[in-house]
Amino acid sequence: MFTGIIEELGEVKQLNQELDNLHITVKSNFTQELKIDQSVAHNGVCLTVVAINNTEYKVTAIKETLEKTNLNTIKVGDLVNLERAMQLGERLDGHIVQGHVDQTAICTHIENTSGSWLFTFKYNSELNNITIEKGSITINGVSLTVVNSKKDAFSVAIIPFTFDHTNFKNFKIGTLVNLEFDVIGKYVARLVNLNKL
């Protein structure tokens, strides 16, 4: 389980395809604190550490993960948002994030609003995921608050600290991002849909 508060940016150092799996080698400042079999969120995707070598570690994304996330578009040199699993007893500064990406979205608008940025994203609403005004959303692993919620789109406001310390600073119109919708909202939506049957 994660909080959506990004610890640091990791650099993709190597990509190796093996059958349907993608082995991803990442360089990070906290690599030496990791252990084999630990979970780390990469752009919001929970992956298991399978190898460690000095400042670099390796994780593996399987076909299911590659089909549902933006990890199939990463390249060597890309920066990914990293967060280690939450420790019990710590403050929950973001919201409950599972690291299980629901779908992707496309960045459709970026507006500099004199000290912050407003990013707008469009997603496929046919998958029955929803946002609500002032509700929580996770974008590339970052816990954020929804503004301008629509059926298939929403915006988020990004403060300078988040902009500087995540890969939001590299987003452009057309950037593909990972979305994890609020887990409580997903259960409520599921119950409502079941009651309609």
Image (tube, rainbow, N blue to C red):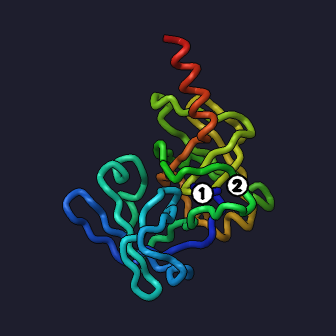
Location of residue 20 in the rendering, given as x and y in whole percent from the top left corner: 23, 57
Location of residue 132 in the rendering, given as x and y in whole percent from the top left corner: 68, 34
Write the residue at 68% across / 50% down.
95
Q: Is residue 54 above or below residue 150?
A: below
Location of residue 152 in the rendering, given as x and y in whole percent from the top left corner: 55, 33
Write the residue at 74% across / 65% down.
160
- Residue 117 visible, this angle: no
Write the residue at 63% across / 45% down.
137
Q: Residues within 10 Å of mark 1 (few under 14, many from 20)?
A: many
Dot placed on the residue nearer the N-terminal end, 2 or 1: 1
Q: Are marks 2 and 1 in contact (CB under 8 Å)?
A: yes
Q: Three-letter amino acid code at disc 1?
A: Phe
Where is residue 5, by image quadrant? bottom right
| Quarter of the rendering occupied by the N terminus | bottom right
- Residue 36 visible, this angle: yes
Q: Three-letter amino acid code at disc 2?
A: Gly
In the image, which disc is placed on residue 52? Answer: none
Return the residue found at the far top.
Answer: 197
SS category of the residue bearing label 2: loop
Q: Which residue is mark 2?
A: 94
SS category of the residue bearing label 1: loop
Where is residue 72, by image quadrant? bottom left
Viewer-closest of 164 and 54: 54
- In the image, taking residue 147 as reference, residue 11 lies left or right, namely left
Q: Is residue 87 above or below residue 157?
A: below
| Real-space CA distance between mark 2 and mark 1, rounded to the nearest whole angstrom | 9 Å
Q: Which residue is mark 1?
A: 2
Viewer-closest of 156 and 143: 143
Viewer-closest of 18 and 157: 18
Q: Is residue 113 above or below residue 26?
A: above
- In the image, taking residue 128 as reference, residue 119 lies left or right, namely right
